[in-house]
Image (spheres, helix red, strand yellow):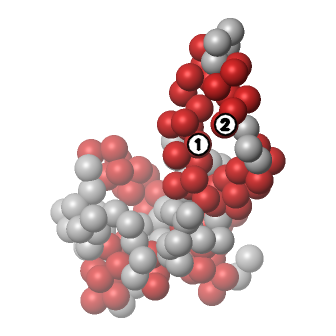
Amino acid sequence: MGYEDVLQELAPCGLNCRKCMANQDGDIRKTSERLLRLLGSFDSYAKRFSVFLPAFQDYPAFKRLLMHFAQGDCRGCRVGDCKLPDCQVLACCQAKGVDFCGQCEEFPCEGTSFDADLTRRWLQMNTRIKEIGVEAYYEETKDLPRYV
């Protein structure tokens, strides 16, 4: 996959937008839609099953979450649809004239507004981008889950 294609997949922070739960073209949305179709009118069955299989008592909450996943509407961070409140990465990368944080001379910096876990991942991803390049990083991570 070429550099321009990778830009359509990876956010400036290094996360894979297509693997995000909110991405309109992502597998999570598509799989959730398919599972909803496959389940059809399972609600009444879940209620009956819950009498002898207690896990089915949670079916209404499961279905609400599945419906949320099926409504993914994000077009990706690079078009300004980032769902992370207060994320400053896209604006910063644009201001610095880079596509990824790892390409910036000031990386690492304090300007992400990420929590501790995401900051750790951001550092790992962009350090790797800096070490091996964008296309190689994409190839190395394209089959890994986003949520680790």
Q: Looking at the picture, how far across and down is residue 103, in whole percent? A: 41, 76
Q: Looking at the picture, how far across and down is residue 44, in whole percent? A: 69, 33
Q: Which residue is mark 1?
A: 63
Whether residues under marks 1 and 2 lie with C-beta atoms below 8 angstroms apart, the answer is yes
Above or below residue 66? Residue 133 is below
Toward the viewer: 124 or 25?
A: 25
Q: Which residue is mark 2?
A: 43
Residue occupying the far top of the picture: 52
Residue occupying the far left of the picture: 110
Give the amino acid type for the residue marked by disc 1 in the picture: Lys
- Circle nearer the viewer, 1 or 2: 2
Give the amino acid type for the residue marked by disc 2 in the picture: Asp
71 lies left or right of 130: right
Residue located at (23% from left, 68% from top) = 86
Q: Is residue 16 visible?
A: no
Q: Looking at the picture, how far across and down is residue 134, in whole percent? A: 57, 72
Residue located at (60% from left, 80% from top) = 8
Please identify the quarter of the rendering in which residue 126 is found. bottom left
Residue located at (76% from left, 47% from top) = 40
Above or below residue 42? Residue 91 is below
Mark 2 neighbour class, 10 Å CA radius: few under 14, some 14 to 19, many 20 or more: some
